[in-house]
Image (cartoon, rainbow, N blue to C red):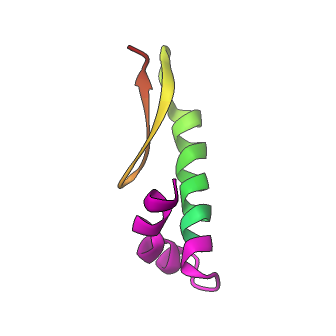
Amino acid sequence: MAEHLRMMERDGKLTFPDEQPIVGALQLFLVHLDEAIRMRRSGETELVPYRAGVKSLVSS
């Protein structure tokens, strides 16, 4: 998780300029997580972080 957040630091700083980059990255990750949960389709039970956010997937 720490590595994923470090990869998001630049975007976190741009999105939340008043926060430290790592804090902005965490806040941005939580936004992506909330969005993935709200937008998931029926049967998608797995949440996987990736560069552009969080994906919801069908469990295999």
Q: Which residue is situated farthest in the bottom direction here?
A: 18
Image position, residue 57 (x, y; %): 41, 26
Q: Is residue 4 above or below residue 24?
A: above
* Left or right relative to 59: residue 25: right
**Magenta region includes residue 15:** yes
Magenta span main SS: helix
Choose between 15 and 8: the one closer to the eye: 8
Residue at point 47% right, 73% down?
Answer: 9
Image position, residue 40 (x, y; %): 50, 29
Residue at point 56% right, 73% down?
Answer: 22
Q: Is residue 26 above or below residue 17?
A: above
Q: How many marks?
A: 0
Quarter of the image where the C terminus is located = top left
Image position, residue 11 (x, y; %): 44, 72
Choose between 60 and 43: the one closer to the eye: 60
Choose between 58 and 42: the one closer to the eye: 58
Q: Is residue 32 above or below residue 10?
A: above
Magenta residues, start to end: 1-23
**Magenta region includes residue 19:** yes
Residue at point 49% right, 62% down?
Answer: 5
Image position, residue 26 (x, y; %): 59, 63
* Left or right relative to 49: residue 18: right
- Residue 19 appears in which quarter of the rendering? bottom right
- Residue 18 appears in which quarter of the rendering? bottom right
